[in-house]
Amino acid sequence: MQGRIIVGLSGGVDSAVTALLLLRAGHEVQGLFMHNWEEDEQGYCTAAEDFQDARRVAQELGIALHRVDLSQEYRQRVFTGFLASYRAGLTPNPDVLCNREIKFGDCLQHALRLGAHRLATGHYARIEAGADGPELHKGIDPGKDQSYFLHAVHRDRLAHALMPLGGLHKEQVRGLARAAGLPVFDKRDSTGICFIGERPFRQFLEQYIEHTPGPIRTPDGELVGEHVGLPFYTLGQRGGIGIGGVRGAGEQPWYVAAKRPDDNTLVVAQGENHPSLLSRQLRTTAVNWLITTPPPADTDITVRLRYRQEDQPARAAQQDDGGVIITPAAPQRAVTPGQSAVIYQGSRCLGGGVIVQTDI
C-alpha cells in the first residue's frame, strides 16, 4: 500500500500503537487530533491533556501532528440528536453516530484534504477485502471488539479506513507500546461517552434536560412512586429508582420495565426476569447494510442489542421502510429503544439499525 496514511491520534495507547505499526510497515504516517467537545469548568473534558499526550506520541515517533476542531459539527450532528432522543424517552448511543458522522465523516474528509488515501484508527475491528467490497469483521479480542459501534458507517467510507489493531489483543497492544517506549503505554482507557468525558451522567443530563416528574406504576397500573423525569432512567435499571417499601409487594428488587412518554409514566416490575422485561420481537429504523443485498428472512443470523451482549441467534425480516423486524431465538431482556440492533453472520458485521419498537 503506497501513499500517506493519517492516523487519528487521540492521545491514548490504541491510536499510538496504530501509528507505530503503520510506520514499521513502511508507510508515510501523519497524525490528526480531533477536538470534538468544548472545554468545561468542571474538568471532565480531557481534550487538552489528550492533545498533549498525542503531541508526545508524535514526537516520539517522529511524525507530523495536525489538529482539527470539529466541536461544532459534533454538537450539531451528534449531540443535538442525542438530547432529542433522550427527551423522547429513548436511550441513544452517541458513539455510533459519532463514528458515522465525525470520525468517518468530517475527520475522514479532513484526512483526505491533507493528502491521505486512508484514515487509520485504533478500533478493535477488522476491515477485510471481500469479493463485493470492504467487509467489517469483529476484532479477535472478544473483550474489546468494537464492530458494534461501527455498523452505521457507510460502506464506501470503510474503503478508506484502516484498523490495524483488529487482529491483536489489548495486552499485546500495551506490550508493543511499552517495548517501543511510547509515553502512553500505561495510560488508562477512556470509558466515558464519546468526547464528553467520564462525568456523572445524570448530573450531565440535568444541564440540558428539564425534570418532568410523573407516576411510577407497576404493569398492572398500581401507583408505587414518582419519578423525576423519564430521560433519567434506563430499561432494566435496578438502582436509583426511588421506590421505598410498597405494601404487599414482597422483597424482590424493582426494575425499570418501560418508559411511556405519552402519559409520562415509568413502569417498574419486580424480579430480574419479570415477563414485562422480556421481548420476543423488535423493529428497527432503516438498516445501514454493509452487504450488497440484505439476507432473506429465513437466513440464520445473530444479533447484538447492546454492546457487551453475546451474539444472540435470530432471524431478520426486511421491511418496506428499510428497517427490519428481528425475531431472536429466545426472549431478550431489557431491549431498549434508541440502542442499536447489530446483525452478524459469524465474525462479519452485516449492518444494523436503531431499535424503535419491541413486541410488534
Image (cartoon, rainbow, N blue to C red):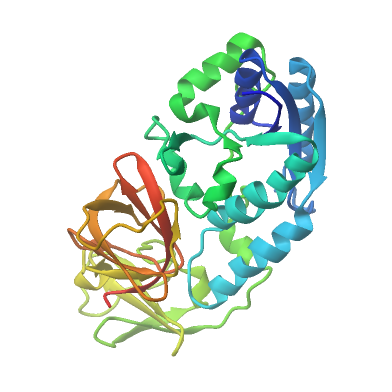
Q: Nearer the viewer, residue 54 or 2?
A: 2
* 337, above or below 145, in the image: below
Q: Tell me what residue is drawn at x 73 percent, y 34 percent.
A: 116
The percent position of residue 99, horizontal first and vertical second, equals 59, 50
- Identify the image quadrant of residue 347: top left
Taking the image as drawn, is residue 251 in sight?
yes
Nearest to the observer: residue 116 or residue 225: 116
**Residue 230 x/y as whole percent:** 49, 76
Quadrant containing the C terminus in the rendered view: bottom left
The N terminus sits in image quarter: top right
Quarter occupied by residue 159: top right
- The relative height of residue 169 versus residue 336 in the rendered view (above or below) is above
Q: Position of residue 314 (x, y in %)?
A: 23, 57
Picture quadrant where residue 240 is located: bottom left
* Position of 108 relative to 250 (above/below): above
Q: Nearer the viewer, residue 230 or 290?
A: 290
Q: Position of residue 348 (x, y in %)?
A: 36, 42
Residue at the limit of the structure toward the top, as seen here: 179
Name the residue furthest front: 131
Question: Visible in this render: residue 340?
Answer: no
Q: Count every numbered label the image shows and give the total.
A: 0
Relative placement, left or right, of 152 versus 206 is left
In the rendered view, does 145 fall on the left or right side of 173? left
